[in-house]
Image (cartoon, helix red, strand yellow):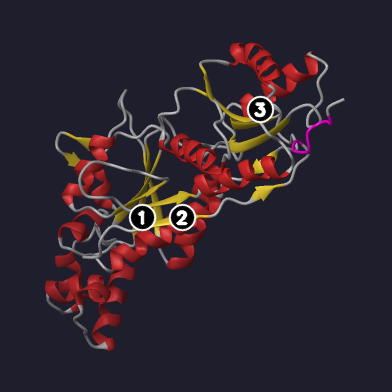
Amino acid sequence: MNRGPVKRPTQADIARLAGVSQATVSLVLNERDSGVRISPSTRERVLAVMREWGYVANASARSLAGGRNNILGVYTFEPVFPTTSVDFYFPFLLGMEQEAAELGYDLLLFTSTANERGIFREGSTRLSLADGALLLGRTPNLEEIEQLRDSGYPFVYVGHQEVSGAPVSYVAADYAGATRQLTERLYQEGHERVAYARLGEGEAQPSRDRERGFRDGRRLMAPVWTLKSIDEVDGLMAEIHTSGITGVVAEQDLLAEELLASAERQGLSVPDDLSIVVLGDSIGARRPGTPWTGLVVPREQMGRRATRLLVSLLETPDAPARTESVECPLTEGTTLGPPRSKP
């Protein structure tokens, strides 16, 4: 039969073809969330017409009507989404996708074509196309997060996130606990003088968490060094030598790599002359596969847990903000050992 030009059917069309009211069609689409039940025969008749005519529910309309689309949004404050398995965010996204599939949800990645990324544009947000959203990023826009919280839109941040006013839901790695354990390991191996070193100002929340763990684990006053660039590493190594430091807690893999290279240039051995433990920040690392003693950031598990938490919040809309901590596994590696015996 020739149906003429292809036209996307509306709910009114489906209702007319199925011999039911438009309200009944809406109930079929939102039955799980509405609490209203219709007869199996009526439901099947409506679905059969939808299949025959290729009807697809409009996600925006369902959201405006208070229905659920079974779509979870993913938004990052970084310029682009990662595209390869070596990217920092790939394990997060992998965990989200796996958990969402198991829970019966689709993922929708929100990107931006503007020069500056933003959740809100002209007072509105596209995130409302999804039932709720997972947010992530090393340098988030805190004002937008607070605005999103105040709007009542459900979201979970992947990573420790503190904002002013009411708290927000997040899933974070337990950097403080793992760093404390590694710091205590240095003392247990016989190191009497240890120090903490990082690249950058350490303003990001994960950096503050790691430093807190170091301060909790130290036995005596211990220096915390902040380097502006890797060009300062040789100078740091000189200070390590003159200060009698035998153990260093390095925040970034890149910094640990430069410390190792500087030690080798000076004829020093790691771990005999200097033990190095690393805290899992792999951004910029140049020697993948180095057997560092340190912690592993449980990115895939964090993605899974954040997705699960978001779905839980969707199912209990009035629940207060919740936070979860994910343990960071430790790696034994070969860069931690007892200090060389003094002659």
From the image, give the main secondary structure of the stretch colored magenta.
loop
- Residue type for callout 1: Leu
The label number, if any, that marks residue 294 in the structure image: none
Q: Tell me where residue 238 appears, x and y as whole percent.
A: 68, 13
The vertical placement of 119 against 153, above or below, is above
Q: Tell me where residue 55 appears, x and y as whole percent.
A: 28, 63
- Residue type for callout 2: Ser
Residue at which label 2 appears:
325
Question: Which of the two discs, 1 and 3, sits closer to the camera?
Answer: 3
Say what secondary structure mark 1 lies in.
Answer: strand
Q: Which one is earlier in the sequence, the residue at label 2 or at label 1?
A: 1
Q: Which one is earlier in the sequence, the residue at label 1 or at label 3?
A: 1
Region of the chain picked out in magenta, as a range: 335-341
Q: Tell me where residue 157 appears, x and y as whole percent.
A: 37, 48
Query: Is 192 left or right of 318, judged from the image as shown?
Result: right
- Residue type for callout 3: Ala
The vertical placement of 1 against 122, above or below, is below
**In this orientation, which residue lies closer to the viewer: 190 or 20?**
190
Query: Is 31 left or right of 94, judged from the image as shown?
Result: left
The label number, if any, that marks residue 256 in the structure image: 3
Residue at which label 1 appears:
72
**In this orientation, which residue lies closer to the viewer: 222 or 65?**
222
Say what secondary structure mark 2 lies in.
Answer: strand
